[in-house]
Image: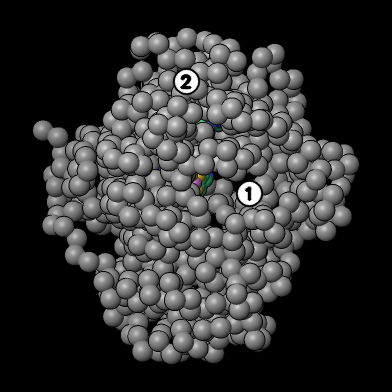
Amino acid sequence: MPKIPFSRGHICSKGNAILDLEADPDRLTTPMRRVGDSWQAESWDVAFAEIGSRLNSIQQEHGRDAVGFYFGNPNAHHFGLSAYIPRLIKTMGSRNLFSASSVDQWPHQLVCWQMYGHQWLLPIPDLDRLDTLLILGGNPLASNGSLMTAADITERMKAINERGGLIVVDPRRSETAAMASLHLPIKPAMDFRFLLALLCALRKIGPPRLAAYGDQLRGFDQVLAWVDGLDGATLLADTGITQEATRQVAAQLYRSEHAAVYGRMGVSTQRFGTVSQYLIQLINLYLGQLDREGGVLPNDPVFPITGPGTSRGSRGRWVSRVRGLPEISGELPVAALREEIETEGPGQIRAMVTVAGNPVLSTPDGVSLDRAMASLSFYVAVDPYINETTRHADWILPPPSHLTEDHYDLFFNAFAIRRIARLSQPIMPRPEGALAQWQILQGLAHSVQQARGEPVAAWPAPREVLAQVFARSPSGITMENLLAAEHGIDIGPLEPSLLRRLQTESGAIEAAPPLLWSLLQEAVETGQGAQPEQTLQLIGRRHVRSNNSWMHNADRLVKGKPRHHLLMHPDDAQARGIRDGQTVRIRSRVSAVETEVWISTDLMTGVVSLPHGFGHQRDGVRLQRAGQVQGVSCNDLTDPEFLDSGTGNVALNGVPVWVEHCA
Ligand SMILES: Nc1nc2c(c(=O)[nH]1)N[C@H]1C(S)=C(S)[C@@H](COP(=O)(O)OP(=O)(O)OC[C@H]3O[C@@H](n4cnc5c(=O)[nH]c(N)nc54)[C@H](O)[C@@H]3O)O[C@H]1N2
Ligand SMILES: Nc1nc2c(c(=O)[nH]1)N[C@H]1C(S)=C(S)[C@@H](COP(=O)(O)OP(=O)(O)OC[C@H]3O[C@@H](n4cnc5c(=O)[nH]c(N)nc54)[C@H](O)[C@@H]3O)O[C@H]1N2
Ligand SMILES: [Mo]
């Protein structure tokens, strides 16, 4: 019997791979100092003393912004990082903060802040109770559901197909599209046009169902009046989707008692990311499914992330020095990182700290960023590996095994399809001399404070932080309950809470906030724009046995068939004289790579797909198993000037590329 209510006994293949990572000889266990091209083990005391002194002197001489930060994805997965990063940021006082959020979910955050008043009031599909689910640009069968945390996702998706229907809009017949009751291939970044056409079709089918929102809805009439002036056929031209199919989807959504529209990476990281996420909210509203059981509802997590003291969201309180890109939620877009390091002048980044991030492989124009990271005066990485990015560090501070630390999932519980609370307790003792992740961050902050001559105060340990939060939590769950519930506490399904939790000035849902409204108008006016001649549009893909850029050192995950190929439709291959398995040269505005091609009808014509996270063959990388994994980095092709206009999030999908066979 599965004992964990949430995961139902299901374990992800990447969870199993933890065993490989535990035994991994490449994993660092003590602080490492770079000496020329080699590395020397050092004690934590020596490491912190030198790091504090170097970071402090750079900040003294060039100002606080001279030290930049990049926080990677695993920060969101670890309490010892996510709950403590704000303290580190506050101590360091730099505005040059970057993270993986700007190659990921920024459009969601901006839209939720604008419409609901808080960036984390993020509606989640009520997967177990809805009948119809329209997914745009998400592949939960590979990704396991993102901003929609759910275990055993394949069974849950199958069940939706049986209750009503799963509809997938995606340029590729992904694993999820292949099992859906309907797959609609779409040209990259055309989603906003399809979504507008869907609204037009809904107008013809029936009136919006808005009774539940009462006077807590503003601006929706403005939206409807404008939509009534649009023409569905014109909108759909060049999207790849017909009017008939759009009508069919609209009818099914409207007819279903419980339905939801959900969009993920494919619509977040594209030119019209913000506009697409905005339209998705408007459609859920129109259907009356927003904040309704069986529709889409924000989780009201036991550990609150929308309460007093949390940041509601922001845009443009300051801008990046070189290109003037607006700040979002206290950070600058990672698309601006390279130029902030390489462009001389006051405010230039001279030192970096990366925490659990690998931006050389995971963010755009990796070749140039690689060069920029090598040019820094000083660089500290908090990371278990010497990888494509951290190889440039002066110091690497390694975290201990996850199995030795307390962990409470702040974000994944907050975006889960049920209300759950779980404290994962250590199952192994921490090796002598190792520091917990929160202690590493504390050590960094204290070392700088000491170099400044400031007093330092010890940070509370994770259990103290949790105990304080749970003592105030209205859920009734106490620290004792949490410690006793080895397999976690499942409080139950999602419940409507959005209307009472709205944090807009008006206290209402803002259906047409001026910023989103103007972005929408602009998108419709500029449209897709002409594609450069003979280009194809590059999109990404994920595989269930790969995790961004850093799990290729686990043999369990990488053995078997290679998965790095460029996928291309037979017509596009034929037009270029390309044969299956051949090596091709892929060129974008920023760079070029060579890799093998797989010809496949899973892709629509005009679109090619390359997964990210590959490209481990760089000098000085110490990942023995990953080094044998073939494949180039798709982010050597992605373009830091190709952005979502609303946020500056990188458009990783729909990048114009030229492909030719190698002679
Ligand atoms: N082309 C393209 N690019 C993409 C994407 C895409 O779809 N297409 N997806 C984007 C998305 S959604 C994301 S989230 C980003 C991810 O971007 P990043 O977060 O920059 O990259 P990761 O590959 O997740 O690298 C994680 C790093 O953390 C280290 N690490 C792992 N666990 C821990 C830990 O517990 N503690 C510490 N201190 N370090 C740890 C690893 O060794 C590795 O160096 O990539 C983005 N890049
Ligand atoms: N196995 C595995 N699981 C993961 C990860 C991983 O690397 N590996 N990464 C984790 C992370 S950090 C994240 S953020 C999530 C991401 O979770 P998802 O968003 O579900 O993951 P992707 O596989 O990137 O799905 C994006 C889909 O968008 C499609 N697409 C590309 N361009 C467009 C477009 O213009 N329009 C439309 N409609 N579709 C488009 C792609 O073909 C792809 O199928 O996954 C998480 N889970
Ligand atoms: Mo992500």
Q: Please, is residue 199 above or below residue 4 in the view?
A: below
Q: Is residue 562 visible?
A: no
Residue 11 picture quarter: top right
Work out which residue is located at the far front of the displayed protein and give it: 453
User: x, y (%) of residue 211?
Assistant: 65, 87
State the SS at label 1.
helix
- Screen quadrant of the N terminus: top right
Q: CA distance from mark 1 to mark 2?
A: 29 Å
- Is 456 situated left or right of 240 in this image? right
Label 2 CA crowd tier, 10 Å (few <14, some 14–19, many 20+) = many
User: x, y (%) of residue 356?
Assistant: 52, 33
Judge by depth and name the residue closer to the eye, 367 or 328. 328
Q: Which mark is residue 395?
A: 2
Residue at 55% across / 77% down in the picture?
510
Residue picked out by circle 1? 411
Are circles 1 and 2 on residues that touch, CB within 8 Å? Answer: no
Label 1 CA crowd tier, 10 Å (few <14, some 14–19, many 20+) = many
Judge by depth and name the residue closer to the eye, 283 or 300. 300
Amino acid under disc 2: Trp
Work out which residue is located at the far left of the displayed protein and give it: 663
- Is 333 situated left or right of 114 in this image? left
User: x, y (%) of residue 628?
Assistant: 38, 21
Q: Is residue 419 visible?
A: yes
Residue at 14% across / 51% down in the picture?
575
Residue at 54% across / 11% down in the picture?
42
Q: Please, is residue 252 above or below residue 553 in the view?
A: below
